[in-house]
Image (cartoon, rainbow, N blue to C red):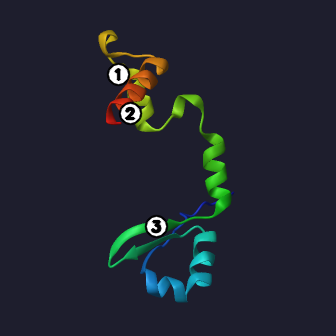
Amino acid sequence: MKTSFPVWSVVVQINILEAKNRLSELIKLAQAGNEVVIANRGEPVVRLMPVARLVRTQATRTENSKPGFLRWLETHPLPPHLQRSHADIELGISEERAAWE
């Protein structure tokens, strides 16, 4: 009989200066599955994660799992009187630029 145990991961938050001094150690922690957050004056700005996990995440993204904003745009289109073609938008931009000169 196989017994499964919960997998624990550690969240490490470290400031930039200390992260520069301990980069190798932080990379090993991230590779082991721990969350490593680098902060600037206590405010989180970057998260380290293994490339393999990032590639796997991107590979599993399908057309139906678009980022939130794109999904929202598809489900909430502009009203017909506000929709313009790409050519119309480019023409409007060109006219605006010409007016500046």
Quadrant location, the C terminus: top left
CA–CA distance between discs 3 and 1? 32 Å
Q: Residue at x 49, y 66 (%)?
A: 47
User: Where residue 8 sits: x, y (%)?
Assistant: 51, 68
| Mark 1 closeness class: few <14, some 14–19, many ≥20 residues within 10 Å | few
In primary-sequence order, the first of circles 3 and 1 is 3
Residue to which mark 2 is pinned: 97
Q: Residue at x 45, y 86 (%)?
A: 17
Question: Hey, which residue is sitting farthest front in the picture?
Answer: 101
Kind of residue indicated by mark 3? Val
Disc assigned to residue 33: none
Q: CA distance from mark 2 to mark 3?
A: 38 Å
Q: How busy is the neighbourhood of tag 3: few (under 14 within 10 Å), some, or many (20 plus)?
A: few
Q: Which residue is mark 3?
A: 46
Left or right: 37, with 50 as reference point? left
Q: State the residue lying farthest toward the top.
A: 80
Cα–Cα gap, marks 2 and 1: 30 Å
Residue that mark 1 sits on: 76
Q: Position of residue 74 (x, y in %)?
A: 43, 23
Compare marks 2 and 3 and give the one earlier in the sequence: 3
Kind of residue indicated by mark 2: Arg
Q: Quadrant of residue 93?
A: top left
Element under label 2?
helix
Residue occupying image coordinates x 54% and y 28%: 64
Left or right of 90? Residue 63 is right
